[in-house]
Amino acid sequence: MKRLSLIVLILTLISVLAACGLGDSPEKGAQEWLQAFANLDGNKLAERTCAAQQANVQQAGLWASVFNIFGQQTIGQQGKTDVSDLKFTTVNRSGNTARVRVTGQIRVSVLALSQTEEVDETWRMVLEDGKWKWCGQ
């Protein structure tokens, strides 16, 4: 009987931790969302975008894809985006919502041209379907 109670307790704890996004965090969600956007990875982008922002992100992703294809056709090169210098910090978290501050530099390069852009933004993240998802600024 004690063993059964222990198993039930362990299974309950696992369920609660899974519902809270164990192994995931607002920072991880924000980082994966930005990396997916930079890589034009529509599947990962959709996975890390909240339901309320899906249509907006799909439209922005479509335009980014069109510009990327145009760039490949005209100069034969795809741009590369480096987001490795960015820092992701949760500044506020309450229940299923969080605010993540994103700071640092993004570098974009095509051929021998490179441009660096400073980033200092705060993003809204929400916990949906067990994952932290980007939900706007």
Image (cartoon, rainbow, N blue to C red):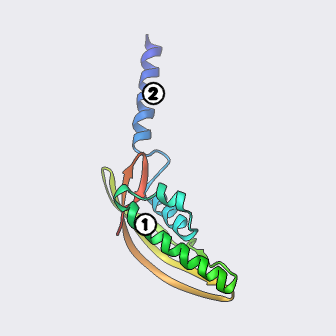
- Up/down of 23 relative to 33, above or below: above
Residue under the image location 39 percent in, 63 percent down:
55
Q: Position of residue 53 (x, y in %)?
A: 37, 62
In the image, 15 versus 135, the foreground residue is 135
Dividing the picture into quadrants, the one containing residue 59 is bottom left
Q: Residue furthest bottom?
A: 113
- Up/down of 2 relative to 114, above or below: above
Q: Position of residue 127 (x, y in %)?
A: 38, 51
Tell me the residue that label 1 is attached to.
57
Which mark is first along the chain, 1 or 2?
A: 2
Amino acid carrying label 2: it is Leu
Please identify the quadrant where the C terminus is shown: bottom left
Amino acid carrying label 1: it is Val
Give the structural element (helix, strand or loop) at label 2: helix
Residue under the image location 43 percent in, 59 percent down:
49
Q: Position of residue 103 (x, y in %)?
A: 45, 74
Dividing the picture into quadrants, the one containing residue 12 is top left
Tell me the residue that label 2 is attached to.
11
- Up/down of 51 relative to 60, above or below: above
How many dots with numbers? Answer: 2
Q: CA distance from mark 2 to mark 1?
A: 37 Å
